[in-house]
Image (cartoon, rainbow, N blue to C red):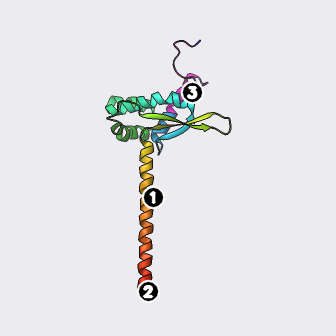
Amino acid sequence: MRHKRAGFKLKRDTSARRALLRGLVTSVIESEGERIVTTIPKAKAAKPLLEKMITLAKQDTLHTRRQAASFLMTPASVKKLFDKLGPRFAQRNGGYSQIVRVGWRKGDGAEQAILQLVGSQLIKRAEDRAKRREERLKAMREGREAEEGGEAAE
Protein backbone atom coordinates (compact mmCIF):
# COMPACT_ATOMS: atom_id res chain seq x y z
CA MET A 1 0.00 0.00 0.00
CA ARG A 2 1.16 3.54 -0.73
CA HIS A 3 -0.07 5.32 2.38
CA LYS A 4 1.55 8.76 2.75
CA ARG A 5 3.49 8.29 -0.49
CA ALA A 6 2.72 11.42 -2.51
CA GLY A 7 3.92 12.25 -5.99
CA PHE A 8 4.38 10.48 -9.29
CA LYS A 9 7.28 8.11 -9.99
CA LEU A 10 6.71 7.92 -13.76
CA LYS A 11 8.82 4.70 -13.86
CA ARG A 12 12.05 6.69 -13.51
CA ASP A 13 14.74 7.13 -10.89
CA THR A 14 14.96 10.42 -9.03
CA SER A 15 17.40 12.25 -11.30
CA ALA A 16 15.68 11.19 -14.52
CA ARG A 17 12.28 12.19 -13.12
CA ARG A 18 13.59 15.60 -12.04
CA ALA A 19 15.17 16.19 -15.45
CA LEU A 20 11.95 15.17 -17.22
CA LEU A 21 9.77 17.48 -15.14
CA ARG A 22 12.21 20.39 -15.45
CA GLY A 23 12.15 19.91 -19.22
CA LEU A 24 8.36 19.81 -19.37
CA VAL A 25 7.94 22.98 -17.29
CA THR A 26 10.60 24.79 -19.33
CA SER A 27 8.90 23.71 -22.55
CA VAL A 28 5.51 25.03 -21.47
CA ILE A 29 6.98 28.39 -20.55
CA GLU A 30 9.14 28.72 -23.67
CA SER A 31 6.68 27.41 -26.26
CA GLU A 32 4.95 29.90 -28.53
CA GLY A 33 1.41 28.83 -27.63
CA GLU A 34 2.36 28.19 -23.98
CA ARG A 35 1.25 24.58 -24.27
CA ILE A 36 2.73 21.12 -24.73
CA VAL A 37 1.28 17.73 -25.61
CA THR A 38 2.30 14.94 -23.25
CA THR A 39 0.81 11.97 -21.40
CA ILE A 40 -1.73 12.38 -18.60
CA PRO A 41 0.57 11.25 -15.73
CA LYS A 42 3.41 13.51 -16.90
CA ALA A 43 1.03 16.47 -17.21
CA LYS A 44 -0.36 15.83 -13.72
CA ALA A 45 3.15 15.63 -12.28
CA ALA A 46 4.36 18.80 -14.05
CA LYS A 47 1.34 20.98 -13.28
CA PRO A 48 2.16 21.75 -9.60
CA LEU A 49 5.75 22.61 -10.53
CA LEU A 50 4.58 24.94 -13.30
CA GLU A 51 2.20 26.66 -10.90
CA LYS A 52 5.02 27.06 -8.35
CA MET A 53 7.22 28.75 -10.96
CA ILE A 54 4.47 31.24 -11.82
CA THR A 55 3.91 31.95 -8.13
CA LEU A 56 7.62 32.73 -7.82
CA ALA A 57 7.39 35.03 -10.85
CA LYS A 58 4.63 37.07 -9.22
CA GLN A 59 7.05 38.20 -6.48
CA ASP A 60 9.93 39.11 -8.84
CA THR A 61 12.81 39.48 -6.40
CA LEU A 62 16.43 38.48 -6.93
CA HIS A 63 15.90 35.49 -4.66
CA THR A 64 12.85 34.20 -6.58
CA ARG A 65 14.67 34.74 -9.90
CA ARG A 66 17.53 32.60 -8.65
CA GLN A 67 15.13 29.93 -7.40
CA ALA A 68 13.41 29.80 -10.79
CA ALA A 69 16.76 29.81 -12.63
CA SER A 70 17.92 26.83 -10.58
CA PHE A 71 14.88 24.84 -11.74
CA LEU A 72 14.29 26.00 -15.32
CA MET A 73 16.68 24.85 -18.04
CA THR A 74 17.28 28.05 -20.02
CA PRO A 75 17.82 31.73 -19.21
CA ALA A 76 15.27 32.65 -21.91
CA SER A 77 12.55 30.77 -20.04
CA VAL A 78 13.42 32.61 -16.79
CA LYS A 79 13.24 35.94 -18.61
CA LYS A 80 9.86 35.15 -20.18
CA LEU A 81 8.53 33.84 -16.87
CA PHE A 82 9.34 37.04 -14.96
CA ASP A 83 8.78 39.58 -17.74
CA LYS A 84 5.54 38.27 -19.26
CA LEU A 85 3.90 35.55 -17.19
CA GLY A 86 4.41 37.03 -13.71
CA PRO A 87 2.64 40.32 -14.51
CA ARG A 88 -0.03 38.49 -16.53
CA PHE A 89 -1.06 36.33 -13.56
CA ALA A 90 -0.43 38.98 -10.86
CA GLN A 91 -4.13 39.34 -9.98
CA ARG A 92 -4.87 35.60 -10.07
CA ASN A 93 -4.66 33.51 -6.89
CA GLY A 94 -3.70 30.17 -8.41
CA GLY A 95 -4.97 27.90 -11.14
CA TYR A 96 -2.56 29.20 -13.76
CA SER A 97 -2.52 26.03 -15.87
CA GLN A 98 -4.94 23.41 -17.07
CA ILE A 99 -4.85 19.89 -18.46
CA VAL A 100 -7.01 19.11 -21.49
CA ARG A 101 -7.33 15.48 -22.56
CA VAL A 102 -6.95 15.01 -26.31
CA GLY A 103 -7.20 11.27 -27.00
CA TRP A 104 -4.88 8.34 -27.41
CA ARG A 105 -1.49 8.19 -29.08
CA LYS A 106 -1.49 6.01 -32.16
CA GLY A 107 1.77 4.17 -31.49
CA ASP A 108 1.29 2.80 -27.98
CA GLY A 109 -2.21 3.89 -27.01
CA ALA A 110 -1.05 6.20 -24.23
CA GLU A 111 -3.65 8.80 -23.30
CA GLN A 112 -2.46 12.25 -24.37
CA ALA A 113 -3.14 15.63 -22.79
CA ILE A 114 -2.34 19.26 -23.45
CA LEU A 115 -0.75 21.09 -20.51
CA GLN A 116 -1.35 24.79 -21.14
CA LEU A 117 -1.42 28.08 -19.32
CA VAL A 118 -4.84 29.60 -18.70
CA GLY A 119 -5.55 32.36 -21.16
CA SER A 120 -3.08 31.17 -23.81
CA GLN A 121 -5.94 29.79 -25.89
CA LEU A 122 -7.64 33.20 -25.72
CA ILE A 123 -4.47 34.97 -26.84
CA LYS A 124 -4.09 32.54 -29.74
CA ARG A 125 -7.72 33.01 -30.79
CA ALA A 126 -7.38 36.79 -30.68
CA GLU A 127 -4.22 36.65 -32.79
CA ASP A 128 -5.92 34.35 -35.32
CA ARG A 129 -8.95 36.63 -35.44
CA ALA A 130 -6.76 39.70 -36.03
CA LYS A 131 -4.82 37.88 -38.76
CA ARG A 132 -8.02 36.82 -40.56
CA ARG A 133 -9.38 40.38 -40.31
CA GLU A 134 -6.22 41.80 -41.85
CA GLU A 135 -6.42 39.29 -44.72
CA ARG A 136 -10.07 40.18 -45.30
CA LEU A 137 -9.32 43.91 -45.34
CA LYS A 138 -6.41 43.39 -47.70
CA ALA A 139 -8.59 41.37 -50.07
CA MET A 140 -11.28 44.08 -49.97
CA ARG A 141 -8.72 46.80 -50.75
CA GLU A 142 -7.33 44.80 -53.66
CA GLY A 143 -10.86 44.22 -54.97
CA ARG A 144 -11.64 47.95 -54.85
CA GLU A 145 -8.40 48.84 -56.58
CA ALA A 146 -9.15 46.32 -59.32
CA GLU A 147 -12.66 47.79 -59.76
CA GLU A 148 -11.32 51.35 -59.89
CA GLY A 149 -8.63 50.31 -62.34
CA GLY A 150 -11.29 48.66 -64.55
CA GLU A 151 -13.52 51.76 -64.50
CA ALA A 152 -10.62 54.06 -65.35
CA ALA A 153 -9.76 51.93 -68.39
CA GLU A 154 -13.30 52.33 -69.80
- Give the residue number, with chain letter if any, for mark 3: 16
Instruction: Depth check: give the residue in front, 114 or 71.
Output: 114
User: Between disc 1 and disc 3, whose residue precedes?
Assistant: 3
Q: Earlier in the sequence, mark 3 or mark 2?
A: 3
- The image shows residue 132, relative to residue 116, as above or below, that is below
Q: Nearer the viewer, mark 3 or mark 2?
A: 2
Q: Which residue is mark 2?
A: 153
Q: Furthest-bottom residue in view? A: 154
Residue type at the position of mark 1: Arg
Mark positioned earlier in the residue sequence (2 or 1): 1
Q: How far apart are the alpha carbons under marks 1 and 3?
A: 44 Å
Q: CA distance from mark 2 to mark 1?
A: 32 Å
Where does the image place residue 82, in percent across and percent down from the top left?
36, 37
Asked which secondary structure carries label 2, the reply is helix
121 with respect to 16 (left or right): left
Q: Residue at x 60, y 24 (%)?
A: 12
Q: Is residue 26 on the magenta stretch?
A: no
Marks 3 and 2 sit apart, C-alpha to C-alpha, by 72 Å
Q: On the rendered image, what quadrant is the N terminus found in?
A: top right
Task: Tell me where the magenta segment starts and ends, as one range.
Answer: 2-23
Are discs 1 and 3 less than 8 Å apart at CB? no
Q: Examine the image and state in which quarter residue 2 appears.
A: top right
Classify residue 63 as left or right of residue 6.
Answer: left
Query: Would you name the residue on which mark 1 appears?
Result: 132
- Residue 110: give its label: none
